[in-house]
Image: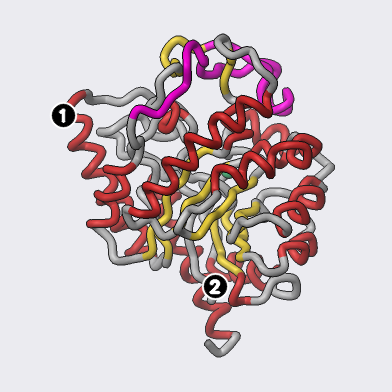
Amino acid sequence: MLQTTIVGSLPKPRWLSDPNVLRAPWRLKGDELHEAQDDAVRLALIEQEEAGLDVVCDGEQRRRHYIWGFLEGLTGTDTEKLAEKRARGGRYSESTPVARINGEVTRPGPVFLEAVRFARAHTKHALKITLPGPMTIVDSVLDEHYRSDEKSLALRFAELLNAEARELAAAGADVIQFDEPCFNIYVDKVKEWGIEALERAMAGVAAKKAVHICYGYGTPLVLKWKKQNRDWGHYGFTLPLLAESGVDQVSVECAASGVDVSVLAALRGKDVMLGVIDVGTEEVESPAKVAERIRAALPHVPPERLMPCTDCGLVPRSRAAALGKMRALAEGAAMVRRELGR
Ligand code: ZN
């Protein structure tokens, strides 16, 4: 019980790409880049294990951005010549640089299969791999090819994600997590087609199926929005829908948001990855603070179902802060485990 994990990304070593920068370009290319990414993944696994986390991942050391890593393995996408779009409902900014869909989108082969095999070979811990969710992909691209409705495009991506997820599970991933921050923005669309697209992506996948829903990375624009936001009711719409779905685990941001954790009671029967680490600050929480945040959720989620986690990816943070936060996460969970006598 109280198994710990992080949402997914970790800062990259500065020999791989600039830390603290989203979408930072690689410092190397070709075989050198590949070797450096292997090394970075091994470090990411070791740091999670040494921190004391239970479920580990590759820290997304092989992708410049959590969505682009998958898109770059497909045909018909362009993550170099970007377009501008009013993404995320304009919540964080009026215009965001996005990848373009400029041709038939297909998946010529597995995207992260080698990555999962490598990580699997270098850890004995339970292994998680993250994929972008269909709704969030659709919101993060400009479709210059199909010009279809969002639902059709989401279902197209869901098919490709499903084929990918099945192969990653077969290669030894214990958890496949779909990142759907847009579930906290377009709550009407979640009901209309978002859950359907997610279910399509998860169907028949022989691993734990997880979904991560947050209020965005700890970047300045997002932090500015969070500071003035007063409505934290989005989970109240999405969690009851997810409770009816085939998802096994739901990751929610609770440390840096103003979310009332009683909403988590709606997830009865699901594992809850509870965000107890703020990814928007360099300040490392004390284990006691982490323990306090875990205790606050215990009246609403049984400890067997509760997984203390970060709010979101740690990629915008320094490596030192990320390491400190992972240690605090593991230590805080251990404190509560001792209190519960297990
Ligand atoms: Zn997130």
Q: Which mark is residue 31?
A: 1
Q: CA distance from mark 1 to mark 2?
A: 40 Å
Element type at mark 1: helix
Q: Which numbered disc flags the more N-terminal residue, 1 or 2?
A: 2
Residue type pointed to by label 1: Asp
Residue range (magenta): 83-108
Crowding around mark 1 (Cα neighbors within 10 Å: few <14, some 14 to 19, many 20+) is few
Q: Position of residue 174 (x, y in %)?
A: 41, 60
Q: Position of residue 192 (x, y in %)?
A: 77, 37
Above or below, comparing residue 117 to residue 93 in the picture:
below
Crowding around mark 2 (Cα neighbors within 10 Å: few <14, some 14 to 19, many 20+) is many
Q: Which residue is mark 2?
A: 2
Q: Position of residue 153 (x, y in %)?
A: 61, 25
Residue type pointed to by label 2: Leu
Above or below, comparing residue 185 to residue 205 in the picture:
above
Check the image and name the residue furthest to the front.
204
Identify which residue is drawn at 54% across, 59% down. 309
Identify which residue is drawn at 81% across, 37% down. 188
In-front residue for pair 167/273 = 167
